Image: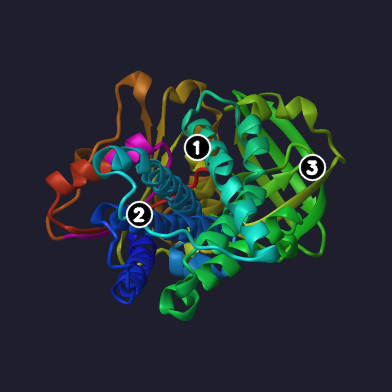
Amino acid sequence: MTTVLLPLLTAICAAWALAVANTTYPAASATLWIVRQEAMNLTGLLSIALMSLSMLLATRPAWLEKPLHGLDRIYRLHKWSGILAIAFGAAHWLAKLSSGPIKTLIGRDGRLPKIRYDGLLEVLREFGKDMGEPALYIVLAMLAITLCRRIPYHYWRQLHRIMPALYLLLALHAAMLAPLAYWTEPVGALLAVVLAVGVVASVISLGGLIGRRRQADGSVLSVSQANGITELTCQLGEQWPSHRPGQFAFITFDRSEGAHPFTIASADRGDRTVTFFIKALGDFTNDLAQRVEVGQKVRIEGPYGRFQLARTAPAERQIWIAGGIGVTPFLAWLEALHSAPTRKAELHYCTRDRDADSMVDRLRALCAALPGIALTIHSARHGDVLTAASLKLADGQQAELWFCGPTGLAEALKKSLQASWNGRWRFHQEAFEMR
């Protein structure tokens, strides 16, 4: 994430610093007024650049999956670039409000002269100026809603849909209020690029064009529910490009509800069928089995993701760890391995109660035909919790760990591995979150 954010922020700061160095202020200008103006300029530039990046990432650009290591990382970067953009936007607003304290300290003397425009340009500038503050209030409210997980996802999604329109208002604000001298300097060129990227991304979003080229229509072949998990199999049309074991897709049952991401739990069978296991975690998934019928039309967008069996390194010790519904990509992996049963790996499945978990029997059946796969079930109810010690990693050993499950379990494992194991290991984790 820092490999993208740090260069972007550095480029913005460097271009701004160069513009400051080239600026000649009126002789009577007071230092505090200059600092206020440049603080507004810098925070405004950083905010709109990060917001433009966030808008680009929201379009689910498949061409960025490889350099950014998967759509799950793209969405995480989208989230944090948006949070930072709003934080800099708030700092920009506070810098604007600092005029009151400055007047109290030194008065109006030394204040920088206001720039005046004529005709339509002045009208647009005033409109952009007026729209900046209310738009900031709305995005601050949206940030609070995003961080408050108690608010249902569908409410958050509906509010989130207005973000492209808000961005266009903020882009106009940034373009109209940027110092005129910027447009003849590198900072202006950089600003023009980020604004163009953000505006195009906003138009794509507002036009409903996100993922359009990766969508396939289909219908529901079967649907069933057991122990809070819905099993759904869909037949897709010729637009479906096939998938690799471990990838996920966005499913749309109802346009008003929108698309939801779920991991594909089946290997590519060559017949354009895909299976999903969907855990009841909220309003949408709780009654999914009752809302979906056999024969119902669906639209599936994808596939996405880099959590793929093809990316594992067979030469290294393979340790696969699944927590709860995080087992779904490994189900696809195991099904795909039936055509290559000599593959070796250790699969650890963590569940609350193995006796009440229907996935346990499914895993055992899949692994029975794969002599190279050593399956271990960890049941918290029975006192068997997965730890770094239970993996029995030898010093100097080279291993590759693939994890999909609760973030807390992943962080605990990584922390204990770093503290207790001196071998060479790599930890791959599916980190997909929509909010």
Characterize the local packing of mark 2: few (<14), some (14-19) or many (20 or more) Cα atoms within 10 angstroms: many
Q: Which residue is mark 1?
A: 140
Mark 2 or mark 1, which is nearer to you? 2
From this view, report whether residue 427 is shown above or below residue 145.
below
Mark 1 or mark 3, which is nearer to you? 1
Residue 403 among magenta residues: yes
- Residue located at (38% from left, 45% from top): 91
From this view, report whether residue 301 is shown above or below residue 95.
below
- 234 or 383, which lies in front? 234
Residue with the most extreme right position: 295
Res 138 quadrant in image: top right
Q: Which residue is mark 3?
A: 255
Task: Please report whichever mark, 3 or 2, sits nearer to the chain's N-terminal start.
Answer: 2
Identify residue type, mark 3.
Answer: Arg
Q: CA distance from mark 2 to mark 1?
A: 30 Å
Question: Which range of residues does the magenta coloring cover?
Answer: 397-411
Q: Pointers 3 and 2 in contact (CB under 8 A)? A: no
Q: CA distance from mark 1 to mark 3?
A: 27 Å
Residue 364 visible within the image:
no
Picture coordinates of residue 362, whole percent (x, y): 55, 37
- Residue located at (43% from left, 79% from top): 185
- 137 or 278, which lies in front? 137
- Residue located at (37% from left, 61% from top): 5
Q: Which residue is mark 2?
A: 111
Q: Pointers 1 and 3 in contact (CB under 8 A)? A: no
Q: Secondary structure at mark 2?
A: loop
